[in-house]
Image (cartoon, coloured by chain):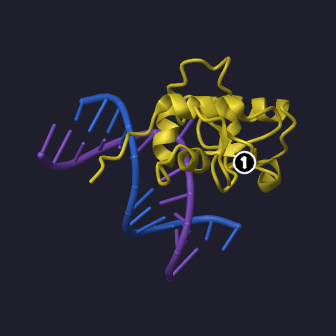
Chain colours: A yellow, B purple, C blue
DNA sequence: AATATGGCACAAA
DNA sequence: CTTTGTGCCATAT
């Protein structure tokens, strides 16, 4: 039996850094690419500790159902900032108590490079 | 070691 | 469409 490697924070951050302005990805997607399907929550744990927000636009990572998820914890103030940043990137949000991004499918970034081999992970 | 709490996902109802 | 329940990975107590 091989012991499964733990989800590597560096990988998550590197992947997140690839998402260009106006494009999005989801926690679950990152988890899958990093080789840990089902590790979506763990991805969140990594992003909340985002050590370098300049390089890693963690606000471009949202939930699979289009809801925003969190930003700097689950605080409402953080969420507001996240929403603002997304809109600054040209993302349209459906307003409401649980705002959701419009046309999420269309905005998903697909061309992720996997670290090391320069491979493209198929989605 | 055991439980609690997260920036989540998904299927059922 | 919404709510609820269960599974998941990682960290903190």
Of B3 and A120, nearer the camera is A120
Is residue A105 positioned above or below A75 on the image? below
Is residue A84 positioned above or below C6 on the image? above
Is residue A31 positioned above or below B10 on the image? above
Question: How far across and down, in percent of the image, does residue A90 sit?
Answer: 87, 36
| Residue A80 visible in this rendered orientation of the protein | no
Q: Which residue is mark 1?
A: A99
Residue A117, picture quadrant: top right
Question: Is A102 on the left or on the right of C7, as rendered?
Answer: right
Quarter containing the C terminus of chain A: bottom right
Say what secondary structure mark 1 lies in: loop
Report crowding for label 1: few under 14, some 14 to 19, many 20 or more residues within 10 A (C-alpha): some
Of A92 and A17, nearer the camera is A17
Is residue A103 positioned above or below A60 on the image? below
Determine the residue positioned at 69% across, 48% down: A97
Quarter containing the N terminus of chain A: bottom left
Residue A14, picture quadrant: top right
Question: Is A27 on the left or on the right of A23, as rendered?
Answer: left
Question: How far across and down, in percent of the image, does residue B4 sit?
Answer: 29, 44
- Mark 1 belongs to chain: A
Question: Is B5 on the left or on the right of A86, as rendered?
Answer: left
Determine the residue positioned at 64% across, 33% down: A16
């Amino acid at each position: 039996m091989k012991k499964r490697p733990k989800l590597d924070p560096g990988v998550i951050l590197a992947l997140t850094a690839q998402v260009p302005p106006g494009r999005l990805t989801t926690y679950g997607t990152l988890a899958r690419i990093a080789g840990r399907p089902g590790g979506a929550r763990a991805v969140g744990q990594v992003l909340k500790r985002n050590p370098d927000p300049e390089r890693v636009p963690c606000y471009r990572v949202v939930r699979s159902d289009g809801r925003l998820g969190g930003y700097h914890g689950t605080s409402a103030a953080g969420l507001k900032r996240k929403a603002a940043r997304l809109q600054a990137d040209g993302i349209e949000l459906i307003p409401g108590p649980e705002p959701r991004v419009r046309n999420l499918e269309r905005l998903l970034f697909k061309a992720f490079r996997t670290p090391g081999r320069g491979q493209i992970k198929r989605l």
